[in-house]
Image (tube, grey):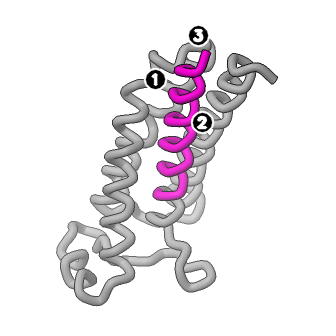
């Protein structure tokens, strides 16, 4: 497979990851009834545009169009890490208690003792960020 086809496939994977994250967040809030905290809203604000950004990039087959996606996913990853640490580190747990109407240290889900909603968002941001970097590197090798 040449780099062009590989990059198109990776771009579709990035778009699919962003869409899956969007649908997952809507499932947790609209179906399960979990009210998002302030940090969850920030992560949504950073994730939701990625569906459009990478969708346009995939249609145009041009990763350069998606540069804002790299920036948003990098910032989103940092927010997700901070949010996860608020939930899991006792030293920061108190800081999340005054986050807003819903405390940011609230753990609606805790699969396997470590998989929380910010963890899932962080994984999505990592996948998007890393795949974007791989596409850029492969574009440079043409």
Span colored in magenta: 122-142
In this view, the residue farthest toward the right is 1
The answer to if 124 sits in the magenta stretch is: yes
Tell me, yes or no, whether the two marked residues, 2 and 1, touch with CB atoms within 8 Å: yes
Label placed on residue 14: 2
Residue at the (52%, 53%) spot, across then down: 25
Reading the chain from its start, which is encountered first: label 2 or label 1? 2
In this view, the residue farthest toward the top is 60
- The quarter in which the N terminus is drawn is top right
Q: Which residue is mark 3?
A: 60
Q: Secondary structure at mark 1?
A: helix
Res 17 quadrant in image: top right
Q: Is residue 40 left or right of residue 64?
A: left
Cα distance between the residues tagged 3 and 1: 10 Å
Placement of 88 over or under 38, stated as above or below = below
Neighbor class of circle 1 (other Cα within 10 Å; few <14, some 14-19, many 20+) is: some
Label placed on residue 66: 1
Q: Main secondary structure of the magenta part?
A: helix
């Amino acid at each position: 497979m040449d780099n062009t086809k590989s990059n198109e496939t990776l771009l579709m994977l990035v778009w699919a990851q962003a869409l899956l994250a969007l649908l997952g967040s809507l499932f947790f809030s609209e179906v399960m009834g979990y009210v998002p905290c302030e940090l969850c809203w920030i992560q949504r604000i950073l994730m939701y545009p990625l569906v459009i950004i990478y969708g346009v990039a995939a249609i145009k087959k041009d990763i350069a169009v998606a540069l804002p996606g790299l920036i948003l996913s990098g910032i989103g990853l940092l927010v997700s890490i901070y949010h996860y640490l608020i939930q899991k580190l006792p030293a920061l747990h108190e800081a999340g208690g005054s986050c807003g109407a819903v405390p940011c240290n609230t753990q609606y889900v805790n699969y396997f003792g470590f998989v929380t909603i910010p963890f899932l968002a962080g994984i999505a941001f990592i996948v998007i960020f890393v795949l974007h970097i791989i596409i850029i590197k492969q574009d440079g090798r043409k």
